[in-house]
């Protein structure tokens, strides 16, 4: 059993870079130093580190709601260089909001059996919140640091933090 795990959600070029197809705004860039610090702390502690990576097909139905973004195999779907994964860290491509849908996240977490899972990344009100909901449904103690999440919609961001704390029982600080 590992003491803790860190899930890094969608810190990808299309969301974080100003030239990205679905740029999440200045706030998304501003969390990079904090996320880097959390990665370093978890790596030093020997924690499980998992990256979730939006990776859509060119004709994904999600593009009926959002502009095309994070097409699998493109620059936009790559994890930003500032937060590059290290050897042995899991990178899980996903096609839906929740990191559990169609991925091995459940198996990876079950094998590691962490006491706590910390979640950072973008977008707070979409992929972060849906993944935290999945953690709650599996009874993981979850922490979401305010300085480690961002969204393109300030109201949705605030609502998501409240929902994760009140409904999912996440520690939001």
Image: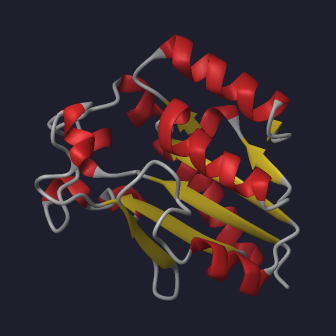
The chosen color scheme is: secondary structure
How far across and down, in percent of the image, does residue 50 sit? 56, 70
Q: Is residue 116 above or below residue 161?
A: below
How far across and down, in percent of the image, does residue 126 sit? 49, 36
Q: Quadrant of the C terminus?
A: top right
Residue pictured at 63% horizontal, 34% vertical: 147
Residues 98 and 148: in front is 98
Q: Quadrant of the N terminus?
A: bottom right
Residue 110 makes an appearance in the image: yes
Residue pictured at 52% horizontal, 80% vertical: 89
Q: Is residue 142 left or right of residue 65?
A: right
Q: Is residue 82 left or right of residue 59?
A: right
Residue 85 makes an appearance in the image: no
Q: Is residue 32 left or right of residue 138?
A: left
Q: Is residue 103 left or right of residue 13?
A: right
Number of marks in the image?
Answer: 0
How far across and down, in percent of the image, does residue 67 sit? 17, 34
How far across and down, in percent of the image, does residue 100 sit? 56, 63
Q: Is residue 74 above or below residue 150?
A: below
Residues 163 and 12: in front is 163
Give the image quarter of residue 63. Answer: top left
Q: Residue furthest top?
A: 155
Give the image quarter of residue 115. Answer: bottom right
Residue pictured at 26% horizontal, 30% vertical: 65
Give the image quarter of residue 2. Answer: bottom right
Q: Is residue 150 above or below residue 130?
A: above
Residue pictured at 72% horizontal, 68% vertical: 5
């Amino acid at each position: 059993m590992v003491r803790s795990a860190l899930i890094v959600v969608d810190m990808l070029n299309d969301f974080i870079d100003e030239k990205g197809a679905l740029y999440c705004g200045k706030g998304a860039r501003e969390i990079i130093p904090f996320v880097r610090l959390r990665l370093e702390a978890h790596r030093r502690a020997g924690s499980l580190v998992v990256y979730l990576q939006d990776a859509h097909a060119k004709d994904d139905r999600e593009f009926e709601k959002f502009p095309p973004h994070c097409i699998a195999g493109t620059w936009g779907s790559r994890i930003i260089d500032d937060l590059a994964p290290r050897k042995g860290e899991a990178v899980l491509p996903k096609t839906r909001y929740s990191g559990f849908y169609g991925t091995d996240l459940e198996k990876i977490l079950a094998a590691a059996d962490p006491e706590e899972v910390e979640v950072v990344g973008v977008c707070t009100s979409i992929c972060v919140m849906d993944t935290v909901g999945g953690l709650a449904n599996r009874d993981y103690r979850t922490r979401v640091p305010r300085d480690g999440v961002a969204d393109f919609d300030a109201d949705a961001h605030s609502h998501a933090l409240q929902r994760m704390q009140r409904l999912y029982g996440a520690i939001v600080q």
